[in-house]
Amino acid sequence: MYNSKITGMGFYVPDNIVTNDDLAKIMDTNDAWIQERTGIQERRWIPEGSEDTSAVMGAKAARIAIERSGLTKDDIDFIVFATLSPDYFFPGCGVMIQDMLDMQTIGALDVRNQCSGFLYALSTADQFIKTGMYKNILVIGAEYHSNALDKTTRGRGVGVLFGDGAGACVLSRTEDNTKGILSTHLYSQGKYADKLIVKTPSIKHWVPEILAGKEDDTSYFPYMDGQLVFKNAVVRFSEVINEGLNANNLTSKDIDLFVPHQANLRIAQFIQKRFKLNDDQVYNNIMKYGNTTAASIIIALTEAWEKGKVKDGDLVVLAAFGSGFTWASAVIRW
Ligand code: UT7
């Protein structure tokens, strides 16, 4: 059996910075509340008139990842794309990226696992490589949240949290079984599907309802039972990280770098404390980008790597929890 390893990574975020003070001008919120509860100082939102979308940002990140992998677009033999904010209901963004990058006729798959989307995508790609089916897979996570948030006081509990951006990596076959993705673990618990959800528009609530003009209908905006999500997140993060470590006969002492999904700095700090990790062993950037959902882990991992925080031989642990509920971890020997 083959192994898979990340050979190139890239990320793209829009230039437009939206600070907490900027939000305080359009809704009843303040910098102190947002920073205290979430750690977020600013986020990137695609500005009006920009061509950026989830697919466009994903393509920008993918170009960087492919170049850094030392491969060309023609070496890529499959695409896995994760988002909760696709450009269209269908087709998925994966095929759009194939076209944007002028790639060969290959397969493209969209993954819809929200905050855990990147890890589900990475795991999917890992399985294809381990079985020998593909050699170089482009794995992308991208989100365009800002166009679908309730930016009024009514939506402040969710609207201040999310940012736009994309990250990508190339996962390649290696015959060195001491390096690369050691394991992934994926879970879901659909009984909590309605605790973090956008209900409308959907196939159930379609054009006639939209045309009826439902300005007061909050089902068009993300809803989150924040405290329930928080409580489940800290439990599931811990479980799935432990499972990954145990599966590889490792302990938290072996972790060189932990990159959690960037949902809330307080969740990341809780996990850091629970696993007795020092600040150098954890990478967070929610302060600058907010929660970019399926893009957050790969943006953070790429940024950490760019800063020299991911070195050859390091043990890197990734973990996520979010809507679905879904949660996942990946253990990687760099
Ligand atoms: O990536 C997906 C996974 N997501 C997560 O893991 C997020 C998990 N949950 C959380 O991070 C937290 O629940 C939040 C940061 C979202 C919210 O923090 P909280 O401590 O649970 O606040 P809350 O929703 O209970 O609201 C507390 C108060 C309320 O006011 P009252 O009822 O106590 O008067 C809210 O109306 O804070 C108010 N509030 C705000 N005030 C200022 C809610 N949003 C805001 C805001 N600015 N943006």
Image (cartoon, rainbow, N blue to C red):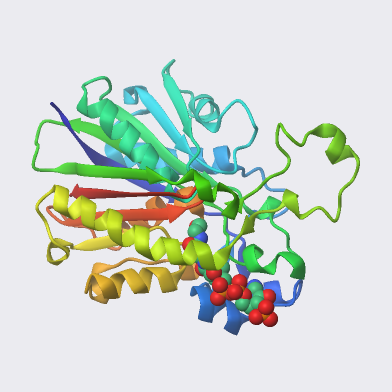
Residue in the image at 48% along x and 75% along y: 39
In the image, 242 versus 266, the foreground residue is 242
Q: Where is residue 327 shown, x and y percent of the image?
A: 39, 50
In the image, 235 versus 59, the foreground residue is 235
Residue in the image at 69% along x and 72% along y: 23
Residue in the image at 29% along x and 71% along y: 272
Res 309 visible: no
Above or below residue 111? Residue 286 is below
Q: Where is residue 37 shown, x and y percent of the image?
A: 52, 77
Q: Where is residue 22 shown, x and y percent of the image?
A: 68, 73
Quarter of the image where ligand 1 sits: bottom right
Above or below residue 232? Residue 331 is above
Quarter holding the N terminus is: top left
In the image, 46 versus 129, the foreground residue is 129
Q: Residue furthest bottom?
A: 32
Q: Residue furthest top?
A: 105
